[in-house]
Image (cartoon, helix red, strand yellow):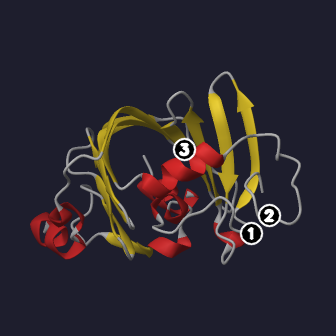
Amino acid sequence: MKRRDFILGAGALAGVAAVPAWAAVNVADIDAYLRNLRTATGRFTQTNPNGSVQTGQFMLAKPGRIRFEYDSPKGAMVVSDGSWVGVFDPKSNRNPTRYPLKRTPLYMLLRDDVSLAEPGLVLGATEDAAGTHITVVDPRAPDEGRLVMTFGTGPVELRQWVVQMKNGQRTKIEVESMTEGAQVSRSLFNLELEATKYR
């Protein structure tokens, strides 16, 4: 599994001047959901660009913090502390490989001030039996890849996201048993602390 692939992927609202083609999709409730989502925990299934599948648990605490602990290989993790994303590879004795969070599509999910009304943020939105799919990019760094988030409705809930890298490789994260508003310790996102433990 290449966790690096996961990291680098990785107007429907009032006030947007030009009405985009996807304006018929109602994203107002999803916009409110994203802004109100502060913490969450749950299980995930990750499908990598090469078709391999991994499972594990995640913890999220906005702004900017997320932690993925993989069931296998033991010790594999991806941790974001709000500024940097660290990839912990148990096959290496080195410190975790780090990437600026703002240079990854994952930043769009973890932003504190995300709004789907932001000009240039939403590339498109569609609806089908699986839910509502919203494709976003960072307007300030549109070449760093894109994120496709899928939401269920009634009530609105995050079901999965797909990180698409600049080279077209895609990594899918399917969310399972997510608990929103969970108590999450900030120490779980301390990269320096985790690096010390990892040595």
Disc 2 residue type? Val
User: Which residue is identified by label 2?
Assistant: 16
Q: Identify the residue shown where x is 41% and y is 52%.
A: 37
Asked if disc 2 and disc 1 are in contact, CB closer than 8 Å, the reply is: yes
Disc 3 residue type? Trp
Q: Identify the residue shown where x is 26% and y is 56%.
A: 91
Asked if disc 3 and disc 2 are in contact, CB closer than 8 Å, the reply is: no
Judge left or right: residue 7 versus residue 123. left
Q: Identify the residue shown where x is 12% and y is 72%.
A: 196
Judge left or right: residue 97 versus residue 114. left
Residue 90 location (% of width, % of height)? 24, 55
User: Which residue is identified by label 3?
Assistant: 161
Disc 1 residue type? Pro
> Does 77 sit above or below residue 142?
above
Marks 3 and 1, how far apart at CA: 21 Å
Secondary structure category for the residue under label 3: strand
Of marks 3 and 1, which one's residue comes earlier in the chain? 1
Mark count: 3
Q: Is residue 171 visible?
A: no
Residue 70 location (% of width, % of height)? 29, 44
> Please, which residue is most extreme toward the top here?
129
Marks 2 and 1, how far apart at CA: 7 Å
Residue density around tag 1, few if under 14, some if 14–19, many if 20 or more, within 10 Å? some
Judge left or right: residue 145 versus residue 44. right
Asked if disc 3 and disc 1 are in contact, CB closer than 8 Å, the reply is: no
User: Which residue is identified by label 1?
Assistant: 119
